[in-house]
Amino acid sequence: MSPGRDEAPAGLSLDQPGEDHLLAAAYLSRVAEPGSVAVALLVQELGYLGAAEAIRSAQAPDEVLRATQARRDSADAAADLDAA
């Protein structure tokens, strides 16, 4: 069962997401620029960490891989967060 709108996926807190969660969100923001419905649906299904790993490892659905192929291998989430 998927977490509800007011529930965090297992192991994550809605109040203070961990560094891994922030890095995954930054990575997804970079690789799916501009926004992608397919990526958003993958995040809804797998959460930020799962979606980021699926994209990084090219194990995501074809539509997601097409939407993220330009930046999938070059995105540097840590640098993006450092610059923010």
Image (cartoon, helix red, strand yellow):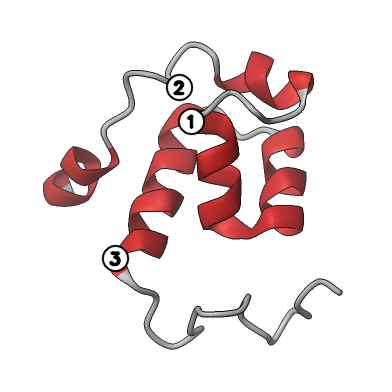
Q: Residue 73 at x, y = what percent?
A: 38, 19
Secondary structure at numbered mark 1: helix
Crowding at mark 1 (Cα within 10 Å: few <14, some 14-19, many 20+): many
Residue 32 appearing in the image: no
Question: How far apart, in angstroms, are the residues tagged by discs 1 and 2?
Answer: 6 Å
Q: With 23 as the anchor, is 25 left or right in this view?
A: right
- Identify the residue position indicated by label 1 in the image: 56
Rendered image quadrant of residue 63: top right
- Identify the residue position indicated by label 3 in the image: 19
Crowding at mark 2 (Cα within 10 Å: few <14, some 14-19, many 20+): many
Q: With 34 as the anchor, is 43 left or right in this view?
A: right
Counting residues from the start of the chain, the first of labels 3 and 1 encountered is 3
Secondary structure at numbered mark 2: loop
Counting residues from the start of the chain, the first of labels 3 and 2 encountered is 3
**Residue at (55, 55) in percent of width and height:** 48
Counting residues from the start of the chain, the first of labels 1 and 2 encountered is 1
Q: Residue 18 at x, y = what percent?
A: 34, 73
Q: Nearer the viewer, residue 37 or 49?
A: 49
Quarter of the image with the N terminus is: bottom right
Residue 67 appearing in the image: yes
* Residue 72: numbered disc: 2
